[in-house]
Image: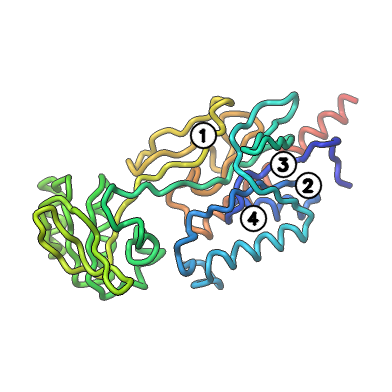
Amino acid sequence: MRVQARGMNDVLVIGGGAAGLSAAMMLGRVRRSVTVIDSGEPRNAPAEGVHGLLALDGTPPGEILARGREQARGYGAAFAEGVVVDVARDGDGFTATLADGTRLRARRVLVATGLVDVLPDVPGLRERWGREVLHCPYCHGWEARDRAIGVLATGPMSVHQALLFRGLTGDLVYFAHTTRPTPEEAARLAAWDIPVVEGEVAEAVTGGGRLTGVRLGDGTLVAREAIAVATRLEPRVGFLAGLGLVPVAHPSGMGEHLPADPAGRTSVPGVWVAGNATDLAAQVGAAAAAGALAGAQINADLVAEDTARRLTA
């Protein structure tokens, strides 16, 4: 039997991507009342297909989300469209306020809002993002194999990124941009015959609806068919500030994340997180798995609380 106070969900899932939908389905299967709040802005929307996902490799992101929503609804999950602007403690639960003023209450909150990729301020990159402008060799590398690829240096992980993409093509160059590689980094690049192009990158050049090259500040055009760039990763969790939950620098130097234990528990009791908001490297499969785990752990937490109440009664 589902136990639900009037106007109170068992769980609010904030974010309707792989992590959030997986959690909603898991919770629905154990008859928890769940509402998923989704802004409709998935991180992987520009991509033509999701890759590296067993049995669903190459499936368009929108199709996967549509299937996920249908399956979660089949187990009783409700959906609300909108952007959460605040989550506050409300008695023995929480209230989430949406941008349009809507308020939803729940005993537990799972944050699965993902992150934002902040690209370098180089004209032309955003327009080809998710197509010929890439970030992950596991997500998009196969599709760029054997092409002329350039790696745009943006931070401490760029040399590592270049070494990963080097396994996919013999024609790779490293654009130092505004950060020259250290002697150790230069030696690692040279060991794989990766030339370093000095000079700041002025723009990514397109032609015929595709990326054609990289133009340097001095006007030099370097022909390239794809560009790998390590973005700065920023979790979409600003609405948690009122609870004292703020993102911190990730050890990799790639951006920020919201810390949590392996099951998704944050430092605020009753608030959980899954997916890219806490795990910057999680692909769709890993995010879905994290959502399922968090959903199961939240249910166990609710069962323990309800059992304690019955014992004291």
Label whose residue precedes the other's in the sequence (1 or 4): 4
Q: Which residue is mark 1?
A: 238
Instruction: Name the secondary structure under disc 2.
Output: loop
The residue drawn where x is 36% and y is 39% is 251
Quarter of the picture containing the C terminus is top right
Colouring used for the render: rainbow
Instruction: Name the secondary structure under disc 3.
Output: strand
- Left or right of 148? Residue 80 is right
Disc assigned to residue 166: none
Label whose residue precedes the other's in the sequence (3 or 2): 3
Disc assigned to residue 11: 3
The amino acid beneath tag 4 is Ser
Determine contact: label 3, label 1, CB under 8 Å: no
The amino acid beneath tag 3 is Val
Q: Quadrant of residue 257?
A: top left
Marks 3/2: CA–CA distance: 8 Å
Q: Quadrant of residue 305?
A: top right
Mark 3 Cα within 10 Å, few/some/many (few <14, many 20+)? Answer: many
